[in-house]
Amino acid sequence: MTAIKKAQADMKSMLDDAIQGGLINITVAVTSMTTNTSEAITRMEKENKILKDQLDDAIQGGLLTISKAVSAMTTNTSVAITQTEREQMIIKDQLVIPTIYFYARTAASSTVSQTVVYTAVEVNEGQGYDPATGRFTVSVPGLYAFTVQYCLSNMYEAWLEIVNKKKTLQRSSMKDKSGTYPCVSMQVFTKADVSDQIWVQSTSGSNSQLYTDSFRYTSFSGALIHL
């Protein structure tokens, strides 16, 4: 019996030693796991902070880039607007129609078979009309308006036309059957180039009896109305 008890005591002692050793190993393992977990959390926190800092830097850099881009775009837009306004002013100045018009009339009644020369010049802005030849010479190309009024001698007739480089632009004729010295007019709008000449003449093969007095004017006028 003593031997059995001794053996049992030995076995118990061995079992206690095994349990105690296992508990120590578990404690060491738990301690190691806790330490490793803490270190991992610390590393994760550091990495998260690094990522956050990088993200903040990226956002800040992006906002700065956007701000610079918006500022540059605003500046460029302002410059473009200013340039456009200057160009518009230049174009506006270029589109100002120069003052070119004339008005002339005959100084006395006459019989004409060719060019009618209006020697009494009332207005000649631009100096395009020549009272020596009766011709208007274009100095600025554009759209012109020309008007002719002519009066007839008692019981006579007139056949007139407005021409440009001998091309007929407008024609008119009138015969006085009433003895009232009537006056009639004709008008034409035409595009004309530099050096074109416009004048009034009696139509081919006819004599025109033109009348002028203090109450009736036989006249020729023209004006540049559009570039």
Image (cartoon, rainbow, N blue to C red):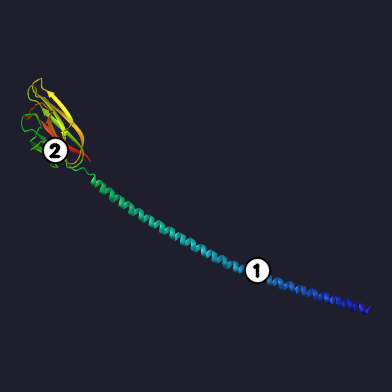
- Which residue is identified by label 2? 136
Q: Nearer the viewer, residue 113 or 191?
A: 113
Query: 153 and 190: which one is in front?
Result: 190
- Left or right: where 51 falls relative to 37: left
Residue 154 vs residue 128, the one in the foreground: 128
Q: Write down the quadrant of residue 1 in the picture.
A: bottom right
Mark-to-mark CA distance, 2 and 1: 106 Å
Asked if residue 225 is positioned above or below residue 36 in the image, the reply reads: above
> Which residue is depicted at the point 38% across and 55% down?
73
- Which residue is found at the position 92% from the left and 79% from the top? 3
Query: Percent x, y for residue 47?
Result: 57, 66
Q: Earlier in the sequence, mark 2 or mark 1?
A: 1
Which label was assigned to residue 37?
Answer: 1
Residue 38 position in % (x across, y down)? 64, 69
The quadrant the C terminus occupies is: top left
Q: Quadrant of residue 137?
A: top left
